[in-house]
Amino acid sequence: MLKKIIIIIFLCSFISHCGYTPMYSLENNSYFNFKKIIIEGDNELSNFIESNLERYNSDKSDKEVTLEINVDYKKLSQSKDLTGATTDYLLVAEVTFDILLNNEVSKVNIKKDFIMKDMDKEFEERSYERTIKQNFAYSIVNKLIIQLSKSR
């Protein structure tokens, strides 16, 4: 037992003094000045993407970015039972970003999909689908920020 405590103290001391910093820490300076954001497509997913982008928006940043975003969201029937009722849905979000950064135009396509089971209660299904859209938006914006950080 004493050996375990000593090992834990040693590891904690070693990790805290070796210069370790988390990869996605807030100090990575990945803030941008979004001058103009134009979003077309699914309203709910577009709103989630826009609110996630606001976390990375800073007027103090010298990296000015203009974004044109096209959001395509589909809810497709994936499988059906013997009666013809849908049992699984395929949720697909495809987002195309036209980016103007440092007088260079680039295009980024990000696609996310998820298989959702059909639920008995419509309210629960809509609520779960909304949560999935929020997760899509969070993931899509994180991938975009990584792309923007690479193209400095």
Image: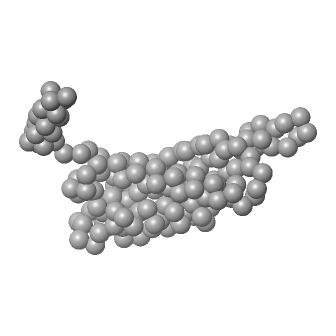
Q: Identify which residue, 117 or 23, lies in the foreground.
A: 117
Report the front residue among 41 and 47: 47
Instruction: Give the residue drawn at x 64%, y 54%.
Output: 129
Tell me, yes or no, if residue 107 can be seen here.
no
- State the count of labels: 0
Question: Which quadrant holds residue 33?
Answer: bottom left
Q: Is residue 84 left or right of residue 52?
A: right
Residue 64 vertical placement versus 19 (above, below): below
Q: Nearer the viewer, residue 151 or 59?
A: 59
Quadrant (top left/top right/bottom left/bottom right) for the N terminus: top left
Whether residue 121 is visible to the viewer of this picture, yes or no, is: yes
For residue 24, above or below residue 102: above
Residue 90: % across, % down: 68, 43
Residue 64 pos. (x, y %): 30, 65
Q: Which quadrant of the figure has residue 12?
A: top left
Q: Residue at x 13, y 37 (%)?
A: 9
Extreme left residue here?
Answer: 17
Quarter of the rendering containing residue 21: top left
Residue that appears at 28% across and 72% down? 59
Residue 2 drawn above or below residue 111:
above
Q: Which residue occupies the extreme bottom position in the image? A: 59
Q: Position of residue 140 (x, y in %)?
A: 47, 51
Residue drawn at 85 percent across, 43 percent down: 85
